[in-house]
Image (tube, rainbow, N blue to C red):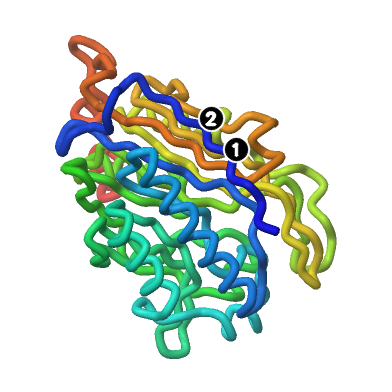
């Protein structure tokens, strides 16, 4: 029996933002199947259901967690078995869901390109066209480096509903220079699919003794406030059971505004069942940081480059 989807909808607007005025974002936080062709099928069936539900609430983009199609905690053999080309069946199904529901879809999946594999994200427009395929450039830990090659291109910025939108992949959401780069490219919103957990098993078989930090407590609000961005963080919830052990995900999805404050954030109740978090990002609704200060234009980071050249 399918699990119900809890909808948390926060907006002061009667209708979704008009083109160029803002973006209504839906974040899916769910517990999915992992590590098999059957799991991929179940997760894509859920994608169709979630996309239709997001569209019913007027969402203009729906974001799924990192490696949504296969589950995150797959090993090297499962990666090679389940990874797909950038125009493979999972992306094609997401394209159809986007077109049928008239909303953009952000689909993370493991990508195969010949004999190389990538932790990838397909950005699909509301008309079903793929506008970008991003390969994670900053890999986390031994397992990701075992399974994947690092991407060589900086994160893309695409247009969704007339708003420039950048994308980061999980661990990348913790690197300040990436936000600066996206802001310099004109991004107003950053979408961050993730698979952030508590404890996990290291390559030598030991469990980590210290839980992984919760990026939504400090890093993401700070980046939103400094670079004047909306940051939408879409995480998993619950557990994934694989031969190497069990992964428990934080379920800490949410959207933070350019003032560093949350527009919407998952609660402990939201972590108990699959949920869809929906909120509106409207740049004009957030007052400027200061009448005179602007971190983006006032920074003098080029001095670091000059200093290195003189050493």
Q: Is residue 234 above or below residue 145?
A: above
Which residue is farthest top? 291
In terms of image quadrants, where is residue 60? top left
Q: Quadrant of residue 162?
A: top left
Q: Secondary structure at mark 1?
A: loop
Q: Count the labels in the image.
A: 2
* Residue 135: x %, y % from top left: 39, 66
Judging depth in this view, the residue of 94 and 308 nearest the camera is 94
Callout 2–callout 1 Cβ contact below 8 Å: yes
User: In the shown orientation, is residue 242 left or right of residue 28?
Assistant: right
Residue 83 pos. (x, y %):
51, 79
Q: Which residue is mark 1?
A: 252
Q: In the rendered view of the protein, which quadrant contains the N terminus?
A: bottom right
Q: Secondary structure at mark 2?
A: strand
Q: Upstream in the sequence, badge 2 or badge 1? A: 1
Residue at 26%, 50% in the rendered image? 309
Residue 300 visible somewhere in the drawing: no
Q: Nearer the viewer, residue 239 or 128?
A: 128
Q: Position of residue 224 (x, y in %)?
A: 38, 30
From this view, report whether residue 276 is shown above or below residue 69: above
How far apart are the two marked residues, 2 and 1, measured between alpha carbons?
7 Å
Q: Residue at x 20, y 41 (%)?
A: 163
Going 45% across and 54% down the picture, which residue do you hit? Answer: 169
List the residue tagged with mark 2: 265
Q: Residue at x 27, y 46 (%)?
A: 165
Kindly tell me whether residue 263 is visible in this rendering. Answer: yes
Query: Left or right of 93: which side holds 128?
Result: left
Answer with left or right where residue 284 lies relative to residue 251: left
Instruction: Please rate how many residues cluster around mark 2, counting C-alpha atoms within 10 Å: few if below 14, some from 14 to 19, many from 20.
Output: many
On the image, the x and y values in percent for residue 64 come to 48, 54
């Amino acid at each position: 029996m399918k699990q119900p989807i809890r909808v948390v909808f926060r907006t002061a607007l009667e209708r979704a933002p008009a083109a160029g005025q803002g973006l209504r974002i839906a974040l899916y936080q769910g517990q999915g199947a992992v590590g098999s062709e059957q799991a991929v099928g179940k997760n894509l069936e859920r994608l169709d259901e979630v996309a239709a539900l997001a569209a019913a609430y007027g969402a203009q983009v729906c974001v799924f967690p990192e490696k949504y199609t296969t589950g995150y905690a797959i090993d090297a053999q499962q990666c090679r078995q389940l990874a797909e080309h950038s125009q493979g069946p999972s992306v094609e199904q997401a394209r159809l869901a986007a077109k049928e529901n008239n909303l953009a879809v952000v689909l993370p999946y493991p990508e195969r390109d010949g004999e190389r594999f990538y932790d990838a994200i397909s950005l699909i427009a509301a008309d079903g066209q793929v506008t970008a395929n991003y390969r994670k450039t900053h890999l986390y830990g031994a397992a990701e480096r075992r399974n994947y090659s690092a991407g060589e291109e900086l994160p893309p910025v695409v247009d969704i509903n007339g708003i420039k939108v950048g994308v980061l992949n999980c661990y990348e959401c913790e690197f300040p220079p990436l936000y600066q780069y996206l802001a310099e490219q004109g991004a107003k919103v950053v979408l961050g699919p993730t698979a952030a957990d508590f404890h996990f098993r290291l390559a030598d078989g030991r469990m980590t003794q210290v839980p992984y930090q919760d990026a939504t407590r400090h890093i993401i609000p700070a980046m939103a406030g400094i670079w004047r961005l909306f940051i939408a963080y879409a995480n998993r919830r619950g557990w994934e059971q694989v031969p190497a052990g069990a992964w428990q995900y934080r379920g800490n999805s949410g959207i933070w505004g350019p003032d560093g404050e949350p527009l919407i954030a998952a609660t402990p109740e939201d972590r108990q069942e699959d949920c869809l978090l929906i909120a509106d990002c409207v740049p004009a609704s957030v007052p400027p940081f200061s009448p005179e200060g602007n971190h983006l234009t006032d920074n003098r980071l080029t001095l670091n480059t000059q200093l290195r050249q003189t050493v």
